[in-house]
Amino acid sequence: MTDKKATLEIDGIDDAIELPIYSGTLGPDVVDVGGLTAQGLFTYDPGFVSTASCESKITFIDGAKGILLHRGYPIGQLAEQSDYLETCYLLLYGELPTTDQKAHFLSTVGLHTMVNEQICTFFNGFRRDAHPMAVMCGVVGALSAFYHDSLEISDEHHREIAAFRLIAKMPTLAAMSYKYSIGQPFMYPDNSLSYAENFLHMMFGNPCEPSTISPVLAKAMDRIFLLHADHEQNASTSTVRLAGSSGANPFACIAAGIAALWGPSHGGANEAVLEMLKEIGDVSRIEEFVARAKDKDDPFRLMGFGHRVYKNFDPRAKVMKEAADEVLAELGIEHDPLLEIAKRLEEIALSDEYFIEKKLYPNVDFYSGIILKAIGIPPSMFTVIFAVGRTVGWIAHWNEMISGSYRIGRPRQLYTGYTERDFVPTSQR
Ligand code: CMC
């Protein structure tokens, strides 16, 4: 809270309305509009462009400067010096773990990597060609039917177990959704492996041979999870908070987050980027697609460009681009045609007046698909991998909300439908 106040004068209302202003540790001040309801007024902000929906201590973004901090630590430093599970600990508990805390955290995640065997039978109900995100929406929500001993949301210990279960089981379920789609047996987790290695083992291993996992690819996979770990109040996280605000259980809330993530404007963009690069097909066709993206009458957008908050380079995209170069070099892929198209597209878009004026820069999804494709992950799994990485962010926000004071989320509306009218019987219509 500051001493600053906003004063709102409204035609037809005699007294000016005073609204308190709050300051955070970083970022713009916020005007508390809660008092407007008593005056018979609501604010109107479609898409929540100017609305802070909550107070949070987890992640900070300065979109103009391209800054992303988790609990104060810059994303570049975390990507360089930390790893995914350590970042999970940081997001959940607020501080980096000591050596002992980290070892305990890792072993506890390991205790929860298997899923109840009954869950395996769920998969048979899906078509083999189902989109893995459709499968994930279903099976993650269904976890609430299996883990009744962690559903008491007012119990801190239950919330912690649910967090461990979700972080540990998401890679298992993600890999199962892939194995099911290609008709291969599910692979049980191997807890002697790291989080990323274990995911690659469950994705690409088979029961007939020991898994061989490239340390380079495991490091790249870990970095992809880390770069997706949290991003403050984005559409899926806000969905998780909103679902959670009604008192719904954490597994159901995360399933709601997965559904929100699936759309191409959000997490679905990584799959869409690769499809777009394939459709462009050749560097010579880039101009044509850039022209389409600029055409007001064409719904086509350059996927992987633009962001609601970043009006400067997405700091995650910078790390992702470096990682793409590293992975391709390690794999000996000297000329990846899609990477060539991506790099040229980026150059052209960044020098084009339309993209400069609208501050449309490549976002995290622009390069992640190139790395995932090089690792051998099919495009339909890209958004699932985003969901695996983001699960910790969703849980951290859900837990922050539930452990503090909160009210059910209930936005209002500007109603523009009919005024009251009398029912007309069928015979008189
Ligand atoms: N290609 C062409 N024009 C674009 C693009 C694009 N990718 N993105 C925005 N614009 C234009 C848009 O047409 C609008 O123009 P005008 O002002 O003339 O109407 C202007 O830029 C502002 O766009 P907006 O849709 O009002 O901005 P928004 O903040 O509502 O949407 C966005 C942000 C990410 C949904 C949008 O930029 C987009 O659709 N990008 C492509 C999809 C994508 O890459 N999504 C991944 C986001 S990052 C990962 C994540 O966090 O989920």
Image (tube, rainbow, N blue to C red):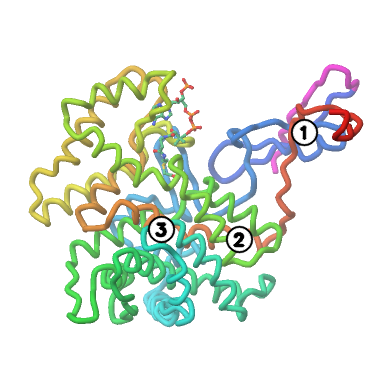
Between marks 3 and 1 in the image, the one whose residue lies nearer the viewer:
3
Left or right: where 35 falls relative to 32: right
Secondary element under disc 3, as helix, strand or loop, is loop
Nearest the eye: 77 or 326 = 326
Coordinates of residue 19 in the picture (x, y in percent): 77, 34
Residue wearing tag 1: 42
10 Å neighbourhood of mark 3: few (<14), some, or many (≥20)? some
Question: Is mark 3 in CB contact (under 8 Å) with mark 1?
Answer: no
CA separation, marks 3 and 2? 34 Å
On the image, the x and y values in percent for residue 139 come to 49, 67
- Numbered label attached to residue 98: none
Range of residues picked out in magenta: 1-14
Residue at (8%, 46%) from the top-left corner?
334
Q: Is residue 7 magenta?
A: yes
Whether 289 is drawn above or below 122: the answer is above
Whether label 2 touches label 1, CB < 8 Å:
no
Whichever of callouts 2 and 1 sits on the residue coming sooner in the sequence is 1
Q: Residues within 10 Å of mark 2 (few under 14, many from 20)?
A: some
In the picture shown, does residue 355 fall above or below 92? above
Q: Amino acid at mark 1?
A: Phe
Q: Is residue 173 above or below residue 290?
A: below
Q: Position of residue 333 (x, y in %)?
A: 10, 50
Which-is-in-front pick, marks 2 and 1?
A: 1
